[in-house]
Image (cartoon, rainbow, N blue to C red):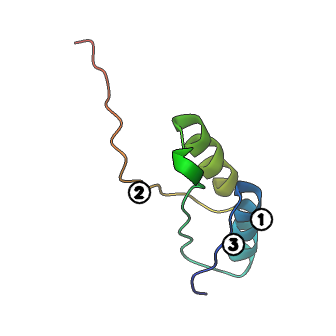
Amino acid sequence: MTKVALEHTAVRADFARFAAGAGADVLMVLPPDWDASTTPDTLAEHYGAVAAHFPAMLVTGIFIPVWNSS
């Protein structure tokens, strides 16, 4: 398979199910981000929906600082 443009999380989750059933080894998805609307919650929702159907390894390029109290 090659690049497939799907614009909504639900459609991407359906495609993840299709890709897994077709025997795909890798599925690369990007979160929907209209007008810079992506938030940590929408990222979790998006990748969670896709990962329900296809094993997920996330490479986002987004730095999330981790607070350490020690």
**Residue named by callout 1:** 14
Tell which circle, 2 or 3, labels the residue nearer the N-terminal end. Answer: 3
Q: Amino acid at mark 1?
A: Asp
Which residue appears at 66% of the width and 57% of the height? 50
Tell which circle, 1 or 2, labels the residue nearer the N-terminal end. Answer: 1
Q: Residue furthest left?
A: 70
Which residue appears at 27% of the width and 19% of the height? 68
* Nearer to the camera, 29 or 27: 29
Q: Secondary structure at mark 2?
A: loop
The local crowd at label 3, few if under 14, some if 14 to 19, many if 20 or more residues have their Cα within 10 Å, is some
Instruction: Tell me if residue 44 comes above or below residue 65 in the rendering.
Output: below
Q: Can you tell which of label 2 and label 3 is closer to the viewer?
A: 2
Q: Residue 59: which numbered mark, if any?
A: 2
Tell me how far mark 3 sits from mark 1, CA to CA: 10 Å
Q: Quadrant of the C terminus?
A: top left
Q: Position of residue 8 (x, y in %)?
A: 71, 59
User: Can residue 17 be seen from the camera position used here?
Assistant: yes
* Nearer to the camera, 60 or 27: 60
Q: Position of residue 59 (x, y in %)?
A: 41, 57
Q: Amino acid at mark 2?
A: Val
